[in-house]
Amino acid sequence: MSEEERKRWNARYEAREGRKEASRFLREQEPLIPSEGRALDVAGGEGAEAEWLARRGLEVTLVDLSDVALEKAERAGRASGVKLRVERVDVETESLPRGPFEVVVCLNYLWRPLFAEFPRVLAPGGLLIFAQPTRSNLERHAHPSSRFLLEDGELPGLLEGVEIISYTEGWTEEGRHEARLVARRR
Ligand SMILES: C[S@@+](CC[C@H](N)C(=O)[O-])C[C@H]1O[C@@H](n2cnc3c(N)ncnc32)[C@H](O)[C@@H]1O
């Protein structure tokens, strides 16, 4: 991943006002999510999900390429009284922070080699929560472009060292065609 990509994401986050809500898909997993231990949000952007996890009592690390996103996440966390650990990590060239994590979240970001890393940083029995649009999403949306999309039906074949708890693929309430997965490390 190039410096250019970082600049592109920084510019996007600089231009963006306000912040989205934590993902509905993540919130729906609340009954499965522990209220203590460590969580990692991979490519977690401005930290809406990280903050939601921290409010539940987890000690959360958020990694992202964009320093602007990380600053915003840290600031928003501080303003609402939760402490997030943020780390600038290019996950395409650097390792994920050392685990073990009870929960690993990766939403709207795809780098296929991460599927080999997730079981290495998850605690035994730890949860992986992942969602990403698939190629069918192009039927209704031009973005993300095809290089950022999963192939339809591809996700289960990428998994390593985890057992699927739930897996769906289809149009979501938000109008995107997504593969969504919750899995547990063996
Ligand atoms: C579509 S946003 C998703 C953000 C958040 N997970 C969400 O669902 O709102 C993709 C995120 O991936 C980050 N990103 C892109 N390339 C990355 C890389 N190589 N390493 C770490 N983060 C990266 C971007 O900075 C951005 O925050």
Image: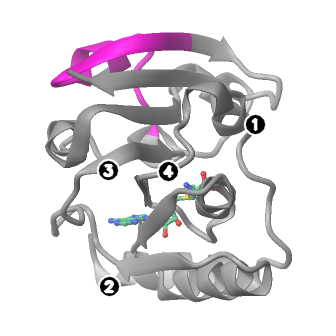
Task: Report the disc number at residue 36.
Answer: 4
Residue toward you, 55 or 91: 55
Alpha-carbon span between mark 2 and mark 3: 29 Å
Q: Which mark is residue 3?
A: 2
Stretch of the chain drawn in magenta:
149-168
Camera-near label (2 vs 3) is: 3
Q: What residue type is labelled 2?
A: Glu
Q: Which residue appears at 57% of the width and 46% of the height?
A: 35
Residue at numbered disc 1: 24
Is residue 77 found left or right of 42 in the rendered image? Answer: right
Disc 3 versus disc 1: nearer the observer:
3
Apparent side of residue 41 relative to residue 186 in the rendered image (left or right): right
Q: Which one is closest to the eye, mark 1 or mark 4?
A: 4
- Which residue occupies the foreground of this view, 43 or 75? 75
Residue at 42% in and 43% down:
103
Q: What residue type is labelled 3?
A: Phe
